[in-house]
Amino acid sequence: MEEVRGTKTLMEHLHGLVPNELECNTAIKSLYQQLIGHQMYATVQTRVDIAYSMSVLSRFLVNPSSSHLDAGKRVNRYLSATKDDGVLIEFGPDDKDLNVKIYSDSDWAGNWKDNARSTSGYLVTIGESSPISWRSSLQTQVALSSCEAEYYALTDAVKEGL
């Protein structure tokens, strides 16, 4: 997909991806797992911007369908369009503000079709804007309110900070 036409968006809003109820094609499954594995490597190393997409697409590794593969290819098109983006951390002798900042957020019942669990995310930065740690994942329990979902996300972020 080196010569693919790029896109500036990762996933469509309310992407509509649901678990595959049919037996998956082994060729699609193998290709999908390789694709997500390569993208996950980029997520862990330098591409914090695709963490949420990887969290969603990783849920379908066991039994993917062609629509899941299409969504994974869309991430590749996004990576192609934004190949000069990534994490760059530079510190110089004039850097005085090396404070750690932690940001967190959640969506309440964002996975409402399957089990009503929320997605949490956090970003830890040092200095002005250099990210050093990030994560996006489903919460382990069902939050009964948006405030509770935010509390769970904040708890994960604080644990990472500590």
Image: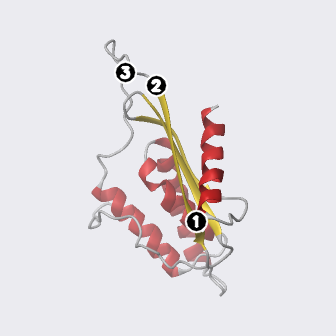
Q: Is residue 35 above or below residue 16?
A: above
Q: Amino acid at mark 3?
A: Phe
- Category of crowding for the residue at label 1, using alpha-carbon neighbours closer than 10 angstroms: few (below 14), some (14–19), many (at least 20): many
Between label 1 and label 3, give the one nearer the viewer.
Answer: 1
Task: Look at 38% across and 35% down and name the residue there.
Answer: 129
List the residue tagged with mark 2: 99
- The answer to whether residue 33 is seen in the rendering is no
> In terms of sequence position, does the residue under pointer 2 or pointer 1 come before the other?
2
Task: Look at 67% across and 70% down and name the residue there.
Answer: 62
Q: Amino acid at mark 2?
A: Asn
Q: Residue furthest bottom?
A: 22
State the image coordinates of residue 1 (x, y, percent, origin top left): 35, 64
* Helix, strand or loop for disc 1: strand
Q: Which mark is residue 108?
A: 1
Q: Is residue 30 above or below residue 44?
A: below
- Category of crowding for the residue at label 2, using alpha-carbon neighbours closer than 10 angstroms: few (below 14), some (14–19), many (at least 20): few
> Label 3 vs label 2: CA separation?
13 Å
List the residue tagged with mark 3: 91
Q: Is residue 8 above or below residue 84?
A: below
* Helix, strand or loop for disc 2: loop
Circles 1 and 3, Cβ within 8 Å, touching? The answer is no
Q: Amino acid at mark 1?
A: Trp
Circles 3 and 2, Cβ within 8 Å, touching? The answer is no
The reply, left or right, for residue 7 in relation to residue 107 is left
